[in-house]
Image (spheres, helix red, strand yellow):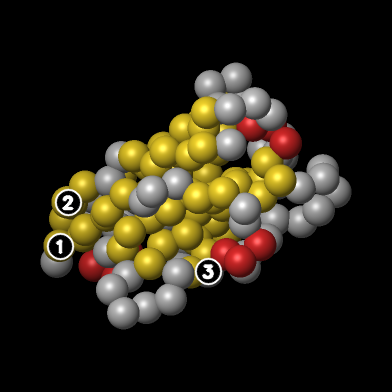
Amino acid sequence: VQLQASGGGLVQTGDSLRLSCTASGPSFSRYHIGWFRQAPGKEREFVVGISRSGSSTDYADSAKGRFTISRDNAKKTVYLQMGGLRPEDTAVYYCAADHSIISNPIKRNPLEYEYWGQGTQVTVSS
């Protein structure tokens, strides 16, 4: 599967953005999808993940209450709605796919994801 992340941009503190992760290739609904981010000089970190069907989600503490993940398997797209953005949310955001059996949990370790999009820059000014 190939992934394309989009929707990033330059916003102000408190603004909202919606990122999209669109896939090409078959069997999109067989993949858990995770969003990660990487700020300059920092390691890539897990933000949020969603299961194959969309019935389960997992949020990092930094995302709880501010970000919402959803997916539309018919459109092969996962959305990350981000609200209440802060300067510390500034990073390149990546989506990734984990080809997982349905009972597997959503993974937080980026090394366990097989496919990655190219990333989209989110910059939040103070």
Name the residue type under label 1.
Ser
Quarter residue 53 falls in: top right
Name the residue type under label 2.
Leu
Q: Residue 67: in sight, yes or no?
A: no
User: Which residue bears the numbered disc 1?
Assistant: 125
Report the side of 13 relative to 120 (left or right): left
Q: Residues within 10 Å of mark 1 (few under 14, many from 20)?
A: some
Name which of mark 2 and mark 1 comes first in the sequence: 2
Q: How many numbered marks are there?
A: 3
Residue 89 percent location from the top left of the image: 32, 64
Residue 74 to residue 57: above or below: above
Task: Check residue 10 in the rendering and tell me which mark sits there, or answer none.
Answer: 2
Secondary structure found at label 2: strand
User: Which residue bears the numbered disc 3?
Assistant: 61
Residue at 31% x, 63% y: name it. Answer: 91
Residue 6 percent location from the top left of the image: 34, 39
Residue at 53% x, 69% y: name it. Answer: 61
Residue at 51% x, 37% y: name it. Answer: 2
Name the residue type under label 3.
Asp
Residue 5 to residue 105: above or below: above
- Do labels 2 and 1 touch, CB within 8 Å? yes
Q: Gap between marks 2 and 3, in whole Å? A: 23 Å
Residue 101 percent location from the top left of the image: 82, 45
